[in-house]
Image (cartoon, helix red, strand yellow):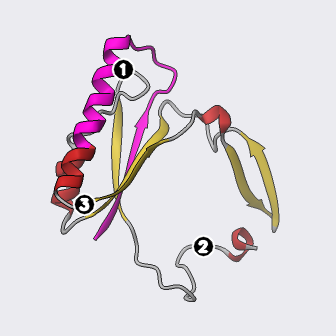
Amino acid sequence: MRYMLLIYTNENAQQTPDQSQQIREGHRHAMQEATRKGFLRGAEPLASTSTATTLRAVNGQVVLTDGPFAETKEQLAGYYLLECESLDDAIGIARQIPTACGGGEGCIEIRPIRPFTPGAEPTGVSRAVRA
């Protein structure tokens, strides 16, 4: 089963150089453990939300806006892509991932990836968005 671990944090919180180093070490450890177990398929940090572009379909028209989709307390900071046997395996890796990437506290959303067959109609994607 494939899982996406989505890391949410407050990108505007302040942290000391020592805290930044601890966070980097925490990510390095989590990636090494996921690699050792054969689970890791990818992991990358994201640029700040100020660099985001949001695309949405409004009445059949595509509308692009600068910035994130919504103003929130926590922002998506990065992800891990795992392929493992169970949710318990994914939780085991998620427990090791620092959530204070931008400082302060955060959370990790663990979400299974639905199987997709090329050529098949994707479930839950509207035609207006794909057009």
What is the number of the mark on residue 20? 1
Residue 41 lies, in percent from the top left, at: 35, 60
Q: Is residue 98 above or below residue 117?
A: above
**Image point (52%, 21%), residue name:** 12
Residue under circle 2?
125
Per the rendered image, the range of residues in magenta is 1-30
Q: Quadrant of the N terminus?
A: bottom left
Q: Secondary structure at mark 3?
A: loop
Query: In this view of the protein, which residue sits in the foreground, 11 or 127?
Result: 11
Q: Quadrant of residue 61?
A: bottom right
Q: Distance of mark 2 from mark 1, alpha carbons? A: 38 Å
Residue 113 lies, in percent from the top left, at: 39, 67
Query: In this view of the protein, which residue sits in the foreground, 1 or 24?
Result: 24
Q: Quadrant of residue 115?
A: bottom left
Q: Distance of mark 2 from mark 3, alpha carbons? A: 28 Å
Q: Distance of mark 3 from mark 1, alpha carbons? A: 25 Å
Q: Secondary structure at mark 1?
A: helix
Which numbered disc, 2 or 3, marks the residue that appears first in the sequence? 3
Residue 118 lies, in percent from the top left, at: 53, 85
**Image point (38%, 10%), residue name:** 16
Whether pointer 2 and pointer 3 mark residues with C-beta atoms closer than 8 Å, the reply is no
Q: Residue placed farthest to the bottom in the image?
A: 119
Q: Is residue 93 above or below residue 57?
A: above
Q: How many marks?
A: 3
Q: Quadrant of residue 101?
A: top left
Which numbered disc, 3 or 1, marks the residue that appears first in the sequence? 1
Residue under circle 3?
39
**Image point (52%, 40%), residue name:** 46
